[in-house]
Image (cartoon, helix red, strand yellow):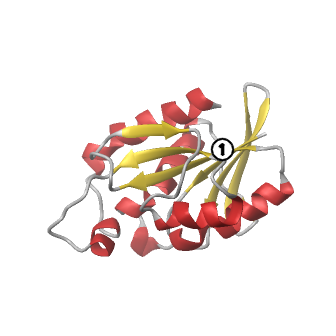
Amino acid sequence: MNIVIGIGNYGKQYEHTNHNMGFDVVDALAKRLKLKFDKEAYKGLIARGEVDGEELLIVKPQTYVNRSGECVELLQKKYPNARILVVVDDFDLPRGYVRYRERGSGGTHNGLRNIVEHIGQEFERIKIGIGRDISVDVIDFVLSKYDKEFFAPVIEKAVDEVLNRL
């Protein structure tokens, strides 16, 4: 089983913000696979499907970014042998850059840090670079809306990367 988890904040006010890049990538993934987020469990919204004969869960935690680990830990306990792939924004990467890592620390991302606190560093991640605007407070920047026209192809590239990793 594969579990792909997009990190973001729930609520209309956070839609299409830099910090919700993970949500937007898994929404695009679900759309491409013709799956719907139609179940709520493990503190998240879940779309269930199959890719190449293997079961797939796509999850959007409903705990806010800084508490994403709560959802991930519940999923790991329910599916201990599942492969976990987390999709997340990263302001330390250049804007539009997509990077895959097999494991690692939480770095500067509070959502990743929280996941590491809950389950350790042994999970895969795809990071989408949102760049950093040093003229704006970090919190204000990550909660600001991103340029949809610029990021539309980046999101599709990230979806391709997820599918290539499954």
Left or right of 145? Residue 157 is right
Look at the numbered disc 1 and give the secondary structure of its residue.
Answer: loop
Q: Residues within 10 Å of mark 1 (few under 14, many from 20)?
A: some
Residue depicted at 70% across the width and 58% down the height: 38
As drawn, the residue found furthest toward the left would be 135
Residue depicted at 30% across the width and 51% down the height: 148
Left or right of 15? Residue 71 is right
Count of marks, rendered view: 1
Residue 110 against residue 149 in the figure, above or below: below
Residue depicted at 42% across the width and 34% down the height: 157
Q: Quadrant of the C terminus?
A: top right
Q: Where does the image place residue 120, in percent across and percent down from the top left?
A: 67, 57
Q: Where does the image place residue 118, in percent across and percent down from the top left?
A: 68, 65
Q: Where does the image place residue 2, in percent across and percent down from the top left?
A: 73, 40
Quarter occupied by residue 40: bottom right
Q: Where does the image place residue 9, in percent across and percent down from the top left?
A: 50, 69
Q: Is residue 10 visible?
A: no
Q: Is residue 89 visible?
A: yes
Residue depicted at 78% across the width and 32% down the height: 54
Foreground residue among 34 and 120: 120
Foreground residue among 107 and 14: 107
The residue labelled by disc 1 is 35
Left or right of 42? Residue 20 is left
Q: Quadrant of the N terminus?
A: top right
Residue 141 against residue 81 in the figure, above or below: below
Amino acid type of the residue that numbered disc 1 sits on in the rendered structure: Leu
Residue 140 against residue 100 in the figure, above or below: below
